[in-house]
Amino acid sequence: MSAWFMSENSLCRKAFARVAAALALGLIVNQLAAAAEGPAPDPRANLPGRQVYETYCAACHNIPGTRAPALSALQLMSAQSLRLALTTGVMQQQGSMVPKEKMPQLIEYLAAPEQDTNWTAAMMCGPDQRSVNLQASPALTMFGVDHNNSRRLSAKQAGLSSKQLPELELAWAIGFPKTTSLRSSPVIVGSTMFYAPAQSGKLLALDIEKACAKWVYDVGVAVRSSVSFGDIGSRKALIFADQQAQVHAVDAQTGERIWKANGRHDATGNITGAPVLYKDRIIVPVSSSGVGSGANPKFECCVGHGAVVALDAATGKQLWVAHTMEDAQYTGKTSATGVKLRGPSGAPIWSTPSIDVERGLIYATTGQNTSLPATPTSDAVLAIDLATGNLKWTFQALANDVWNLACRPEPAQSGPNCPSPADSVLKDYDFGAGAVLTKKRDGSDIVLAGQKSGDVWALDPEQNGKLLWRQTFGDGSALGGVHWGIAVDSEYRVFAPINDPHFPEFKDYVPEPGMNAIDIDTGKVLWRKPVTADCSNGREARFNLCGEKYGLSAAPLVIDKSVVAGALDGRIYIFDAATGDIVWQYDTLRDFTTLNGVKGQGGGIDSHSVFAGSGMLFVASGYGGFRQPPGNVLLAFRPKTKTR
């Protein structure tokens, strides 16, 4: 989940090695401009910001093998999104290398042209069609569907049965301007969907049938997390986090802000997983890690660590903070260039926590350390006391995984802030998927978690996270294995989507992208269904890595007796939960005519972008990070009928 970064099995190993030395100094040769995507000339070539881009950015963004978004994707983003990313967001450390006086030139060169049209005003429902009925039973109240993170909807909840799913057709599409990536799961109550298209900086109350907006809440900056729903006092509230780690509580009836509060414990953390509302508190996962800082050889690497923060639901006041480690201190060691080193750092929490109501615990999963010393809380499942924030137990899946952006596949190419192979396994094997609490056939509880290593782990919560079984799919990689989530059904099966990009130059690496079903009791593999590349019918022209990135990264969703999954190359799959047979497939990698008149482009499907409710399946198509195809459309599918 270390966005835009490279690691051991990344496709960029050979390409990036050629520029590693220059990157370590913050420099790049102008010849890299020739590596830009596509033969088309750059219409902004004469702007002074082009040289700034070539000097400070092109080393990553012009190399097709890296995870960094392509220049063409960056130039679809708004000036605000770019500025935030470079100053307070995921690219803050890289942005700090750009001279202050040159930053406006860089933003001007990259940002999409400003438009005078108010796109939300153009898609408002009629004045007599804007009422929001919150009395209906909610179909979807949070990303995990429930506090156990099951990602399972019954036919009644979804309004869809497995018999209907093979007969889906596109009902409508809406597009969002200056958007390249969609990452959020909404709340669905009755005929209203509360959806936040990330880069738009808006939260929309959408009429599901007409795809018009009942109200619009202006966040002010991009939205980063999915949306959760529940009671705050007498009000029905929507909870989410923005790009600046501010948590918003919004009245679901009116779209008015209830409060806004800082959700992080330090000055740099992000909130990537969804805040979860439970009774009188909101549980916030913080993905602070310091992973990007290591790229700067002058930085005293590294600081920042993950946390879970509890907020008072009524006011937003912080109640407690559960840190994944203590604050970083100087270790007494220096880098190869004589810079003092700090640690520990890392163990961010990228995923949505689950809540064990019976035991009063929060289960949160973590990523790797980013500087030494390694801690037992990295690449781990943590059980945290819901009332106090005290750590109750830890299960560490991989020890000594210390990695940051200074690290390269070949140790000799690594920057001075990368640990040595003697001190770290250097894997970058995050838990990006949240833990799932479910039951075995005998009624006892079990905790499940999927990792980028390709592992699915089963733990016993009654025995402080004792390992019950482990099932491994493939070799794993920094972009492989389980990325954003797993799901369970009512028949004691857990479904593990495997991402595994194809790296043709690595003879010892065998990718295994596809969907897998595992017996919850035993860990036995019940079925496996690979997915394969498809570059036919003009798909390669839209996505030049279609033969390499086609795995399943987005969190899957169980609907009735079926499993829905989205692929990096824009395809949607529906699998029969019992057999693994693909019963329906749809390609979103194309242009769409949208109801709101915004030019619609489908792309990769990732993160939290598959959801359902009110008799429809929804897919947000477009994810420009990790070198995947950007896009900007929300698609709604419903069962075909003879008459309409």
Image: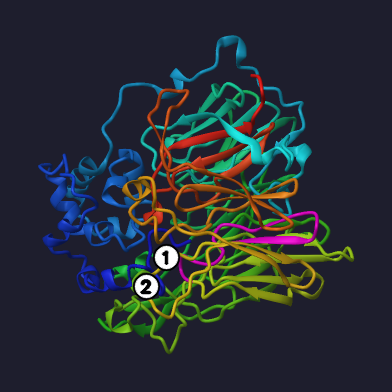
Residue pointed to by mark 1: 290
Q: Is most of the magenta stretch helix, strand or loop?
A: loop
Is label 2 in contact with label 1 (beta carbons under 8 Å)?
yes
Please identify the quarter of the rendering in which residue 359 is found: bottom right
Q: Which residues are magenta?
A: 477-497
- Residue drawn at x 33%, y 41% is 77
Left or right, 340 with reference to 382: left
Please identify the quarter of the rendering in which residue 226 is found: top right
What SS does tag 1 mark? loop
Residue 487 magenta-highlighted: yes
Nearer to me, 436 or 223? 436
What color scheme is it? rainbow
Residue 85 magenta-highlighted: no
Quarter the C terminus occupies: top right
- Residue drawn at x 44%, y 51% is 569
Q: How far across and down, in percent of the image, does residue 21 sit?
A: 21, 74
Nearer to me, 70 or 57? 70
Nearer to me, 147 or 328? 147
The answer, for residue 388, to whether it is visible in the render is: no
Q: Amino acid at mark 1?
A: Gly
* Residue placed furthest toward the left: 46
Few, some or many C-alpha atoms within 10 Å of disc 2 (few <14, some 14-19, many ≥20)? many
Residue pointed to by mark 2: 301
Nearer to me, 390 or 533? 533
